[in-house]
């Protein structure tokens, strides 16, 4: 994989978040003959296509042609493409942007995964590293492909990678992966927590989901460290018994921001970075976009965008943090086959519950009605849901979009949902 010059490489899934774009740009810079194919129609990928103009020998949208796969020396798989997709059977060799990076990078690596909080923790660790290593980089699932900076770093540059279960589970498919030569060997691995997630993808197989998460530490060495932020004893016991290196468990906290800071501090301490500057960097972190993001206060009502809360426990945590009796909660969306038992009770203390339409919402309604909990909606239009929430709130209250579900029936993804919420709130100010 050290010589891409002249190889025919097909990128499956240009995507909307930049990963496919940066893969194409990297391949083009290194002389590969690139084909891009995506199941989405061309008009939905206009922004991404603009960034790769003139770089691909062929672009095919609205479906996949077997010849583009079977005729390629290497196929680059987007994480959103299912591993059992029939089109992959025609591939001679599969890679991902993460595997391309890992097969070339030999520097110090911190890898972070988890069901929730992994983006925040990865960002906090990176902020701490910058105090001692100004050249440190952050990439991965945080929507920054590590291929964007691979050509600009060397083996002395620390890198923090946020890795989803999809990205981790794809690694064994890759031609550059083998059990004899480990591809992912982070000196520090972090698992923030484990909740049921993506069970639509994993066909209701929680064990398969957790196994993918475990790949983050599976090839660590004896002197490497695994940091566990999970508060469930069963996962702590399981991961501790299977980790090759030393295991450090972060004490639990009801404040998720402080808990994320504590996890990051443990990772930094074990990396050898500490001091007042690190503390300042960690406390300066105000949170990421779409993660309990404070937007505005209008007529005394505070608005929070927590669109990245795509699992029920995350929505329940947001409600606890803001204070249930003063929070109007907007929930609902697309079903990921997650366990909703107990969710209705967890959010029943909210001042009011406003529902967005979706397949998960229909299940939420069943749970809410079973305990006699009132709700408003469901609304198909997010602006209608916001209007309803604002009408239910009084000065000093909070309106929080924390769906506890995916977004695909109404939006491309949770980020588009969050941006739309922010636009709606901004218009309320006008």
Image: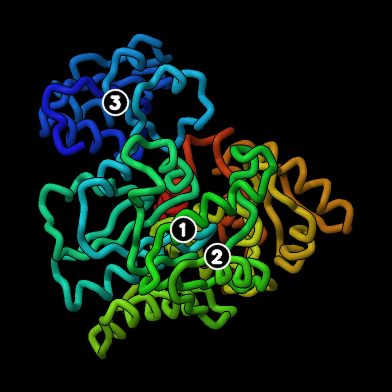
- The structure residue drawn at horizontal position 69% and vertical position 73%, both measured from the top left corner, is 325
The picture places residue 162, in percent across and down from the top left corner, at 38, 56
- Which numbered tag is attached to residue 74? 3
Which comes before the other along the chain, label 2 or label 1? 1
As measured in the structure, the alpha-carbon distance from the residue carrying label 2 to the one carrying label 1 is 8 Å
The picture places residue 415, in percent across and down from the top left corner, at 43, 46
The picture places residue 414, in percent across and down from the top left corner, at 49, 45
Between 278 and 396, the one lying in front of the other is 278
Q: Residues within 10 Å of mark 1 (few under 14, many from 20)?
A: many
As measured in the structure, the alpha-carbon distance from the residue carrying label 3 to the one carrying label 2 is 33 Å
Residue on which the image places disc 2 = 242
Decide: marks 2, 1 in contact (CB < 8 A)? Answer: yes
Which comes before the other along the chain, label 3 or label 2? 3
Decide: marks 3, 2 in contact (CB < 8 A)? Answer: no
- The structure residue drawn at horizontal position 26% and vertical position 41%, both measured from the top left corner, is 100
Q: Is residue 204 above or below residue 32?
A: below
Q: Is residue 14 found left or right of 353 in the rendered image?
A: left
Between 235 and 365, the one lying in front of the other is 235
- The structure residue drawn at horizontal position 77% and vertical position 58%, both measured from the top left corner, is 344
Q: Quadrant of the rendered structure where residue 138 is?
A: bottom left
Residue on which the image places disc 1 = 218
């Amino acid at each position: 994989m050290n010589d891409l010059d002249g190889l025919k490489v097909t990128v499956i899934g240009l995507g909307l978040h930049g990963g496919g774009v940066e893969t194409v740009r990297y391949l083009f810079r290194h002389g590969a003959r690139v084909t891009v194919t995506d199941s989405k129609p061309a008009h939905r990928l206009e922004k991404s296509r603009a960034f790769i103009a003139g770089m691909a020998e062929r672009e095919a949208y609205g479906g996949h042609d077997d010849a583009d796969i079977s005729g390629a020396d290497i196929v680059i798989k987007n994480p959103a493409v299912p591993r059992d997709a029939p089109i992959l059977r025609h591939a001679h060799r599969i890679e991902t942007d993460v595997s391309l990076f890992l097969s070339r990078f030999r520097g110090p690596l911190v890898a972070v995964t988890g069901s929730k909080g992994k983006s925040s923790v990865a960002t906090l660790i990176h902020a701490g590293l910058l105090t001692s290593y100004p050249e440190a980089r952050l990439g991965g699932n945080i929507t920054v492909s590590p291929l964007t900076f691979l050509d600009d770093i060397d083996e002395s540059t620390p890198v923090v990678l946020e890795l989803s279960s999809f990205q981790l589970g794809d690694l064994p498919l890759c031609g550059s992966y083998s059990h004899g030569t480990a591809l992912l060997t982070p000196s520090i691995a972090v698992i923030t927590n484990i909740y049921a997630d993506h069970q639509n993808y994993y066909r209701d197989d929680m064990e398969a989901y957790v196994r993918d998460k475990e790949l983050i530490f599976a090839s660590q060495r004896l002197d490497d460290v695994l940091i566990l932020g999970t508060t469930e004893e069963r996962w702590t016991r399981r991961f501790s018994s299977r980790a090759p290196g030393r295991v450090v468990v972060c004490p639990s906290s009801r404040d998720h921001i402080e808990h994320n800071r504590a996890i990051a501090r443990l990772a930094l301490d074990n990396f050898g970075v500490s001091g007042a500057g690190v503390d300042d960097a960690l406390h300066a972190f105000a949170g990421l976009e779409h993660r309990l993001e404070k937007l505005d206060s209008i007529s005394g009502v505070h608005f929070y965008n927590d669109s990245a809360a795509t699992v029920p426990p995350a929505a329940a945590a947001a409600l606890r943090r803001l204070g249930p009796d003063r929070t109007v909660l907007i929930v609902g969306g697309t079903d990921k086959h997650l366990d909703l038992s107990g969710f209705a009770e967890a959010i029943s203390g909210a001042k009011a519950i406003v529902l967005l339409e979706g397949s998960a919402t229909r299940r939420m309604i069943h749970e809410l009605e079973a305990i006699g909990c009132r709700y408003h909606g469901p609304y198909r239009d997010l602006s209608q849901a916001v209007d309803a929430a604002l009408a239910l709130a009084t000065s000093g209250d909070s309106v929080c979009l924390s769906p506890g579900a995916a977004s695909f029936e109404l939006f491309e993804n949770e980020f588009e949902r969050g941006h739309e919420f922010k636009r709606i709130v901004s218009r309320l100010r006008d």
